[in-house]
């Protein structure tokens, strides 16, 4: 019985040491995340409504760096060759704003389209998915006699 109590006491002590160490690691991790860039978009989705096949439509996703370090947009990845996205080439300072410009070419894309643009940055929220939707009405074929 005495041996059981000693073993239980040792295990509790070891568990206590392990927990206190992880709190310190959590504090360091939280501190590192609060000392970084942070990207906040006004809107992350856009609806173009209905357009005619062959039209090219554009939208701009505006964002702000609400972090404590300069924000670098490392890459913008699109889900389809029909979509082109442009990113700022220079870092966006603390409290400053920027834009991601997106163009969609509807040629050959009749029907309902939902497309994505992944924004990859050095921010604490380093991967943000933007999206847009559009209904593309098929071209009317011109009949020749």
Image (tube, grey):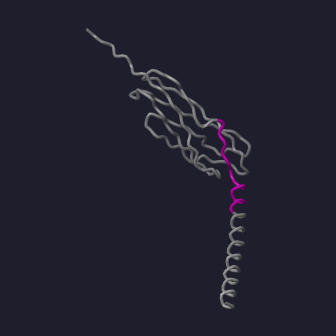
For the magenta stretch, what is the residue range?
A: 29-42
In this rendering, the answer to whether 108 lies above or below 142 is below
x%, y% of residue 58?
A: 54, 28
Q: Is residue 125 magenta?
A: no
Residue farthest toward the top in the current orientation of the protein: 145
Query: In the rendered view of the protein, which quadrant contains the C terminus?
Result: top left
Lateral position of residue 54 relative to residue 70, left or right:
left
Instruction: Say which quarter of the image contains residue 19.
Output: bottom right
Residue farthest toward the front in the current orientation of the protein: 1
In this rendering, the answer to whether 66 lies above or below 106 is below
x%, y% of residue 60?
A: 60, 32
Query: In the rendered view of the protein, which quadrant contains the N terminus?
Result: bottom right
Q: Residue at x 44, y 38 (%)?
A: 80
Query: Exactly how many numbered labels are in the figure?
Result: 0
Lateral position of residue 7 relative to residue 53, left or right:
right
Q: Residue at x 72, y 45 (%)?
A: 66
| Viewer-closest of 93 and 131 | 131
In this rendering, the answer to whether 47 lies above or below 13 is above
Residue farthest toward the left in the current orientation of the protein: 145
Q: Residue at x 43, y 37 (%)?
A: 81
Q: Residue at x 43, y 22 (%)?
A: 137
| Viewer-closest of 129 and 144 | 129
Q: Is residue 38 magenta?
A: yes
Instruction: Say which quarter of the image contains residue 54.
Output: top left
């Amino acid at each position: 019985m005495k041996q059981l109590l000693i073993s239980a006491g040792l295990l509790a002590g070891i568990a206590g040491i392990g927990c206190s160490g992880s709190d310190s690691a959590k504090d360091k991790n939280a501190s590192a995340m609060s000392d970084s860039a942070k990207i906040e978009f006004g809107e992350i989705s856009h609806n173009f409504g209905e357009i005619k096949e062959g039209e090219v439509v554009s939208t701009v996703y505006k964002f702000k760096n609400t972090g404590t370090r300069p924000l670098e947009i490392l890459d913008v990845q699109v889900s389809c060759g029909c979509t082109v996205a442009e990113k700022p080439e220079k870092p966006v300072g603390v409290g400053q704003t920027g834009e991601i410009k997106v163009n969609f070419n509807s040629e050959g894309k009749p029907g309902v389209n939902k497309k994505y643009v992944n924004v990859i940055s050095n921010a604490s929220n380093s991967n943000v998915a933007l999206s847009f939707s559009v209904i593309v009405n098929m071209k009317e074929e011109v009949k020749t006699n």
